[in-house]
């Protein structure tokens, strides 16, 4: 799940945060993500969607099938719906899909790389009034961004779209991803995005691919470079928490649907629960959940035994989806989380003028 959207909702009010927590306890999927396609017009080097998936190995859900799934999610209690991909605008029926979302009263977040957004699309989105439109930026200059996307001109098109969306009065969030190639540009990226009137956020770790590939993580910035360049970047919070890693909402208060109708606990957790083409959402989610889902829901922080005694525990935002992809276990110790926790700790103490050692 895109963490920009999650932080946007969670930061609104403590009451809303409590409502979401209680919904998760009751297995109400208050937030759902639908990947309407794996196809994309870019070729981002760090993409967590494997190349074979992007080529399209299965038939995507039809417009009518998606309408049916939206009805089932609404009945289950979903409030916030994220439409993502791949690149959603690769689907010629995306307008119909978004209209179906709006008709059912969901709070809509649309994630797009921005390069296919035309003036006609800006007008449609202005009419639909999504709660949030998210896009990504990988550098403060075209050469860096385009090197990551592997498409010349993508930087200019994305920047133009951000400006147009903001000018249309839409709420726009721009997610940057920390990499070795852009770590020195993060402060400039934040300034650029906020100067356009959009909200900037930064992800400091890279997820494994859906099939467990670790290639994206070879692009991560070193901890030393991160501390050096992020010390004065306000978008990066390094404050410690009162407790260590906790269980997340995946499989409890959130879920994800793949382009072919597969149901998953979240976008980043490769734990297949069943097909919505073969079974109803309620049957999989509540009536006859698979053993894997029952096991996931039964996990507590005490099950993260590999994390016990870690000096960076209070700085850790451990992801069980990443753990499954990196270690093969939901309770494993994902190296990406360990690196990110150490990075936050060292950044925190650098800002305080001390040492994490």
Image (tube, helix red, strand yellow):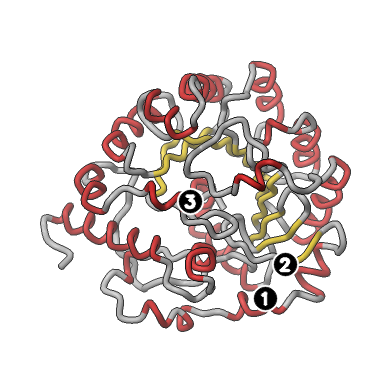
- Give the quadrant of the C terminus: bottom left
Do the residues under discs 1 and 2 have CB atoms within 8 angstroms? yes
Q: Residue furthest top?
A: 119
Q: Can the viewer see residue 23?
A: no
Q: Position of residue 301 (x, y in %)?
A: 46, 78
In this picture, is 274 found above or below 150?
Answer: below
Report helix, strand or loop for mark 1.
helix
| C-alpha span from label 2 to label 3 | 26 Å
Q: Nearer the viewer, mark 3 or mark 1?
A: 1
Q: Is residue 191 above or below residue 49?
A: above
Q: Secondary structure at mark 3?
A: helix
- Determine whether the residue tagged by mark 2 lies in a helix, strand or loop: loop
For the point 60% across and 65% down, the residue is 250
What residue sits right under mark 3 in the picture? 7
Please give the count of numbered marks on the rendered protein.
Answer: 3
Q: Position of residue 256 (x, y in %)?
A: 67, 56
Which one is earlier in the sequence, the residue at label 3 or at label 1? Answer: 3
Q: According to the image, label 2 marks what residue?
A: 273
- Residue 30: x percent and y percent? 66, 58
Front residue of this view, candidates 243 and 112: 112
Number of the label disc, if any, that sits on residue 292: 1
Gap between marks 1 and 2, in whole Å? 7 Å
- Characterize the local packing of mark 3: few (<14), some (14-19) or many (20 or more) Cα atoms within 10 angstroms: few
Q: Quadrant of residue 312?
A: bottom left
Tell me which residue sits at (34%, 66%) in the image: 241
Tell me residue 296's x, y (percent). 61, 75
Q: Is residue 159 among the parts visible in the rendering?
A: yes
Looking at marks 1 and 2 on the same chain, the residue that comes earlier in the sequence is marked by 2
């Amino acid at each position: 799940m895109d963490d920009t959207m999650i932080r946007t909702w969670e930061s609104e009010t403590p009451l809303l945060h409590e409502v979401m927590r209680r919904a998760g306890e009751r297995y109400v999927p208050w937030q759902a993500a639908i990947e309407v396609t794996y196809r994309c017009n870019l070729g981002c080097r760090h993409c967590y969607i494997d190349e074979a998936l992007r080529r399209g190995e299965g038939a995507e859900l039809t417009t009518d099938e998606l309408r049916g799934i939206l009805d089932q999610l609404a009945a289950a209690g979903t409030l916030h719906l994220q439409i993502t991909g791949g690149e959603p605008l690769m689907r010629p029926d995306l307008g119909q899909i978004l209209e179906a979302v709006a008709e059912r009263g969901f709070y809509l977040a649309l994630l797009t790389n921005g390069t296919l957004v035309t003036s006609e699309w800006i007008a449609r989105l202005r009419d639909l009034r999504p709660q949030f439109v998210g896009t990504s930026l990988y550098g403060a200059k075209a050469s860096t961004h385009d090197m990551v996307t592997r498409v010349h001109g993508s930087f200019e098109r994305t920047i133009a779209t951000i400006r147009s969306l903001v000018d249309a009065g839409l709420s726009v969030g721009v997610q940057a991803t920390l990499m070795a190639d852009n770590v020195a540009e993060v402060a400039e990226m934040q300034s650029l995005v906020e100067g356009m009137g959009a909200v900037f956020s930064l992800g400091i770790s890279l997820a494994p691919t859906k099939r467990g590939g670790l290639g994206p993580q070879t692009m991560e910035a070193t901890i030393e470079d991160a501390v050096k360049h992020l010390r004065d970047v306000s978008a990066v919070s390094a404050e410690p928490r009162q407790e260590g890693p906790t269980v997340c909402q995946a499989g409890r208060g959130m879920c994800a649907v793949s382009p072919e109708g597969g149901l998953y606990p979240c976008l980043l957790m490769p734990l297949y629960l069943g097909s919505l083409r073969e079974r109803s959402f309620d049957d999989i989610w509540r009536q006859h959940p698979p053993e894997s889902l029952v096991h996931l829901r039964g996990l507590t922080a005490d099950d993260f035994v590999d994390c016990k005694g870690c000096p960076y525990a209070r700085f850790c935002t451990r992801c069980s989806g990443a753990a499954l992809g990196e270690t093969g276990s939901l309770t494993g110790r994902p190296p990406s989380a360990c690196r990110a926790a150490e990075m936050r700790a060292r950044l925190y103490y650098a800002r305080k003028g001390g040492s994490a050692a």
